[in-house]
Image (cartoon, coloured by chain):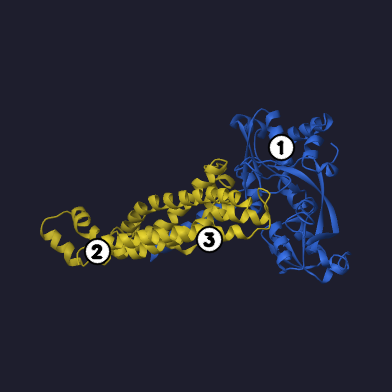
């Protein structure tokens, strides 16, 4: 029983890192995803192909590998460690990798959403004398948002669990914290029960997200 | 299609260029670099009794205390960073950390990849089995038939390989202990310093025990190649051994019998 507060304290610290990484990734990748989506729908061929190539590379390789390269490449090969030493550097490198990776997935969801809006609406807008950006923000965007909520929710829930990949560059997230008691930490070793507590953190958090995203979906139930 | 091929080729070229660029030795004084930065970043793992936490969030242990004292002696702050032990060489070379100070066994692999301090502590690779089977497996011959769990990339794994044992590599030494406790492996090979602290009566692994010692080895501190911090640390070890503070620190963590004279 004496061990419980120690484990909970350690898991809380780890979970804070998980949450930080989760929210930073979402904040960064929502807008970046939109930019990549526009890139891959561009009529200017080089932009289109570069965007598509980028999405292919990022989606086609494991996030774990990308993170290791992003973290170690600058210091090892370019001899300029842009991340700095210490824990902040690990967090920054992990955030950048996650934002890049998730924005590629988001960009394809956005593209699906945008292209699912009938072309007739855009044509109607043009006839009425609206500019392209007016059409996007006033006509397409609202309809697109409600259509992409279910697939985006999927990615968000996956992201909760993917944050644990950051342990490969030794970011001390919650699984790192939970697993440390297997090896021995704070005088507790060989304990597997902290892992069950770790599971509860994930379950509760993704449960809350599921409820919130469900509510959002209901709220966006317009244009029916 | 042509453009796509051009783009693909250019990516391949960039990647191969990157692969060609040679690792250069650190130029200039590492000591000055650390002093100018104002802190020594020490790469560690949670490894009692060398680097660990007890009640507070502060790192303690023999290595942690010595690292603090060393940093103070060259007039900089110390920062402990937990790393993935598998990645210790890239962490050092990429300047993500300045040294690895965590009961590191001086193997050929280690000494060829980094510049290391003088050895300061003795250790051995020791076999862990269930306590009720200890009598049966107390010689190097009898343990041949067992299946072992060892930490990937550790000195224990090297021993298992050398002796031709059947083994599974796991992520950490503690996972190897778990394997034995759970019965998924018959035996584990881990550091004796760790075994003395973690296995046997009065510990979390009361039903395990240690039997055969497979080798003996020494611990050192790792730095980047060509670093002048090595000399600074060797000097520090020497003075603190002579004034008794090194042994005093070792006594605090119960490893005074394993310390090597400087």
Q: Residue B189 appears in which quarter of the rendering? A: bottom right
> SS of the residue at dot 3?
helix
Residue B179's spot in the image, x, y percent? Answer: 71, 65
Q: Residue at x 81, y 60 (%)?
A: B209
* A117 sits to left or right of B37: left
* Disc 1 and disc 2 on one polypeptide chain: no
Colour assignment, chain B: blue
Task: Look at 66% across and 35% down and name the residue there.
Answer: B30
Is residue A171 at all visible to an observer of this figure? Answer: no
Q: Which mark is residue B38?
A: none
Label 2 and label 3: CA atoms lie apart by 33 Å
Q: Chain of mark 1?
A: B
Q: Residue at x 36, y 52 (%)?
A: A32
Q: Which residue occupies the foreground of this view, A211 or A125? A: A211
Provide the residue designation for mark 3: A199
Residue that badge 1 annotates: B65
Query: Mark 2 — on which chain does it sit?
Result: A
Indicate which disc, 2 or 3, sits on the residue closer to the N terminus.
Answer: 3
In the displayed structure image, the side of residue B132 where residue B177 appears, left or right: left
User: For the residues carrying marks 2 and 3, which lies nearer the camera in this image?
Assistant: 3
Residue B116 at x, y = what percent? 75, 42
Q: Could one spot residue A27 in this view of the protein?
A: yes
Displayed quadrant of residue A147: bottom left
Q: Are marks 1 and 3 in contact (CB under 8 Å)?
A: no
Q: In the structure shown, which secondary structural element does the residue marked by tag 1 occupy?
A: helix
Disc 1 + disc 2, Cβ < 8 Å: no
Instruction: Give the colour chain A carries in the figure.
Output: yellow
Which of the 4 image quarters holds residue B3?
A: bottom left
As displayed, is residue A214 above or below residue B32? below
Q: Is residue A164 left or right of residue A149?
A: right
Residue nearer the viewer, A24 or B210: B210
Disc sitting over residue A221 in the figure:
2
């Amino acid at each position: 029983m004496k061990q419980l507060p120690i484990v909970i304290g350690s898991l809380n610290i780890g979970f804070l890192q998980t949450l930080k990484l989760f929210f930073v990734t979402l904040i960064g990748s929502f807008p970046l995803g939109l930019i990549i989506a526009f890139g891959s729908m561009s009529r200017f061929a080089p932009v289109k192909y570069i965007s598509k190539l980028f999405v292919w590379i990022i989606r086609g390789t494991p996030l774990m590998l990308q993170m290791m390269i992003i973290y170690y490449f600058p210091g090892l090969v370019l001899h300029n460690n842009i991340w700095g030493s210490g824990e902040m550097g690990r967090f920054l490198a992990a955030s950048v990798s996650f934002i890049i990776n998730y924005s590629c997935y988001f960009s394809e969801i956005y593209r699906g959403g945008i292209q699912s809006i009938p072309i007739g609406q855009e044509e109607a807008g043009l006839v009425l004398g609206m500019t392209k950006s007016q059409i996007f923000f006033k006509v397409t965007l609202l309809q697109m948002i409600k259509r992409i909520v279910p697939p985006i929710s999927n990615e968000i829930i996956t992201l909760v669990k993917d944050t644990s990949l950051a342990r490969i560059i030794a970011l001390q997230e919650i699984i790192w914290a939970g697993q440390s008691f297997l090896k021995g930490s704070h005088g507790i070793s060989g304990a597997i029960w902290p892992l069950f507590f770790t599971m509860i953190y994930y379950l509760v958090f993704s449960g809350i997200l599921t409820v919130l995203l469900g509510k959002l979906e209901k709220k966006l139930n317009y244009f029916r | 299609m042509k453009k796509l091929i051009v783009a693909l080729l250019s990516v391949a070229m960039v990647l191969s260029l990157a692969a060609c660029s040679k690792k250069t030795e650190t130029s200039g004084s590492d000591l000055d670099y650390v002093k100018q930065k104002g802190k020594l970043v020490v790469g560690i793992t949670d490894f009692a009794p060398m680097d660990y936490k007890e009640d507070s969030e502060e790192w303690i242990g023999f290595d942690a205390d010595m690292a603090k004292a060393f940093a103070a002696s060259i007039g900089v702050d110390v920062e402990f960073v937990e790393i993935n032990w598998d990645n210790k060489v890239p962490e050092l070379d990429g300047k993500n950390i300045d040294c690895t100070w965590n009961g590191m066994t001086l193997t050929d692999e280690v000494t060829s990849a980094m510049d290391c301090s003088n050895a300061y502590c003795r250790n051995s690779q020791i076999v862990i089995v269930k306590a009720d089977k200890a009598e049966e497996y107390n010689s190097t011959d009898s343990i041949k038939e067992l299946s072992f769990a060892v930490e990937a990339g550790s000195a224990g794994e090297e021993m298992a390989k050398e002796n031709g044992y059947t083994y599974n590599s796991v992520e950490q030494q503690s996972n190897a202990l778990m394997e034995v406790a759970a019965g998924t492996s018959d035996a584990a090979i881990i550091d004796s310093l760790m075994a003395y602290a973690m296995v046997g009566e009065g510990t979390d692994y009361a039903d395990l025990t240690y039997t055969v010692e497979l080798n003996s080895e020494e611990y050192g501190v790792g730095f980047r190649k060509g670093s002048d911090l090595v000399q600074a640390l060797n000097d520090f070890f020497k003075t603190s051994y002579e004034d008794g503070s090194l042994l005093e620190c070792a006594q605090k963590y119960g490893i005074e019998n394993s310390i090597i004279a400087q």
